[in-house]
Image (cartoon, rainbow, N blue to C red):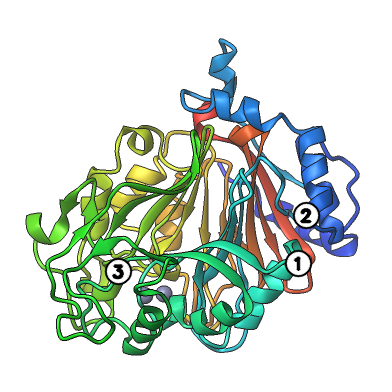
Amino acid sequence: MLRPPLAASLLLALVGACPSSEPELDAGALAHEGEGEGEGEGEGEGEGEGEGESEGEGEGEGEGEGEGEGEGEVAPCSAEHVEHARLAPVAGEVFWQQIGLGGFALGEAALLVLPDGTRALVDVGNDSHDDDVLDALAEHQSDGRIDLLVLTHHHADHEGALTQLLGQLDVGRVVHRGFVDVTPAANDTVVAELCAAVEGTARDGALCARAATGCGSAAFGDAPLACATPTVIAGAGTSTLEVLAVDGWVAGRSYQAEVGGLLADDSNGENARSVVAVVRHGPFRLLFAGDLTGGGSDTDPVEAFVAQHLGDDLLELGADVLHLSHHARDTSSSTAWLDALLPADGRPRSAIAGISTAHLNSPHASVVEAVLDGRLAEGALFVTTVAPGGTSSDELIDAEGGSVRVATAEGGAAVYVQAVRPDGSVVHTVRASAARACRP
Ligand SMILES: [Zn+2]
Ligand SMILES: [Zn+2]
């Protein structure tokens, strides 16, 4: 099913020797090529328009079974390991970069660029990671504009760099789970900083409402709450970023009302309240869920509850790219979650994980085994790093502390996933059909 182990090392050697050579690029690959040389946004947009299909085409055809079907035929699924320059944003396509975060601090952050040009950060890492985030942004843009900051939950490894970044970036909306149901499982400092920075301002994008207002109010955390799910927070038509679940709410239903209370003291109690969101572009789907818990290591099994209510769109064909929650630890990636989002149906898929050196033992062996158990077909598992004690595999692609990048092509009918080392050299790239645009 998966590529032979030798292929990875061979390709690694080839790419390492000559990272910018592009002997065999196809048309889709060329749409990204210019950015590999470190060019700015302008050139990338020009090439994207010229080489790929127009944005209009991609959006118009996306919602059904993908592009092929619109033309009366669905192409066979394909996935191949290709040589490719560093992926970068292209106008009219989705770009995701799981940012490599340095030093010995827990952290996770990603840059997301939507087809309409909306730029978002999904989590921002710890308070020592602001420079890593800014460096990642500087590779792709110069104006410091971030339209949307999505914070999956109130832990320092996801929100800690907020204050520094707000001082250095031109940030639009800050979407977060809200100041409801805040327990000792959250990080006091990051909650206070976020609240002080956004509550009562136009940039506050709290997903859950509370009766009391004011940071540090006595009602902090225990006011009656309601969370808006699902909610499209960016994009339009068939190219959107949509929140599906938050604080145990999904499709208007509440885990705590229907199943039971979530942990309050253990840090996994805050993880259980993470934002779950999907990036859609035509047939393409990328799903992320912060540190959402699935029942492993005595956590609350929120994944199974959310999975039941994801809606037909995701339940029928899963995700093309699944961000593995909680840094690929065994608290997450339950069988129910993986069955829903990475069904072993012969279609190529990829899984990605944001891991920093301090996430000792990540990725956990049980997660690596479960993900590689026939679920990805010819896709692959990519991690920003394998932390000390973490599980590796010949079938796992390690960015060695660098970034994991995802870029759609052909209006979302195809997707590239790539690992890039901290020095900018490409480790490996996979190009695959989107699940909704192919038949196994
Ligand atoms: Zn967490
Ligand atoms: Zn975390």
Task: Determine the CA span between mark 2 and mark 1.
Answer: 9 Å
* Residue 414 falls left or right of residue 274: right
- Location of residue 53 in the rendering, given as x and y in whole percent from the top left corner: 72, 29
Label 2, on which residue?
Answer: 41
Label 1, on which residue?
Answer: 142
Indicate which disc, 1 or 3, sits on the residue closer to the N terminus. Answer: 1
* Mark 2 residue type: Glu
CB of mark 2 within 8 Å of CB of mark 1?
A: yes
Residue drawn at x 73%, y 51% is 7
- Location of residue 45 in the rendering, given as x and y in whole percent from the top left corner: 77, 45
Asked if ligand 2 lies within 8 A of label 2, the reply is no
- Location of residue 295 in the rendering, given as x and y in whole percent from the top left corner: 23, 64
* Mark 3 residue type: Gly
CB of mark 1 within 8 Å of CB of mark 3?
A: no
User: Does dot 3 land on a helix, a strand or a loop?
Assistant: loop
Which residue is farthest top? 72
Dot 2, crowdedness within 10 Å: few (<14), some or many (≥20)? some
Residue drawn at x 34%, y 68% is 330
Dot 3, crowdedness within 10 Å: few (<14), some or many (≥20)? many
Q: Nearer the viewer, residue 279 or 338?
A: 279
Task: Determine the CA span between mark 2 and mark 3.
Answer: 33 Å
Q: Is residue 316 above or below residue 323?
A: above
Task: Determine the CA span between mark 1 and mark 3.
Answer: 31 Å
Dot 1, crowdedness within 10 Å: few (<14), some or many (≥20)? few
- Location of residue 208 in the rendering, given as x and y in whole percent from the top left corner: 26, 62
Q: Quadrant of residue 197?
A: bottom left
Label 3, on which residue?
Answer: 178
Asked if ligand 2 lies within 8 A of label 1, the reply is no
Q: Quadrant of residue 425?
A: bottom right
Residue drawn at x 64%, y 49% is 117
User: Does dot 1 land on a helix, a strand or a loop?
Assistant: loop
Residue 356 disc label: none
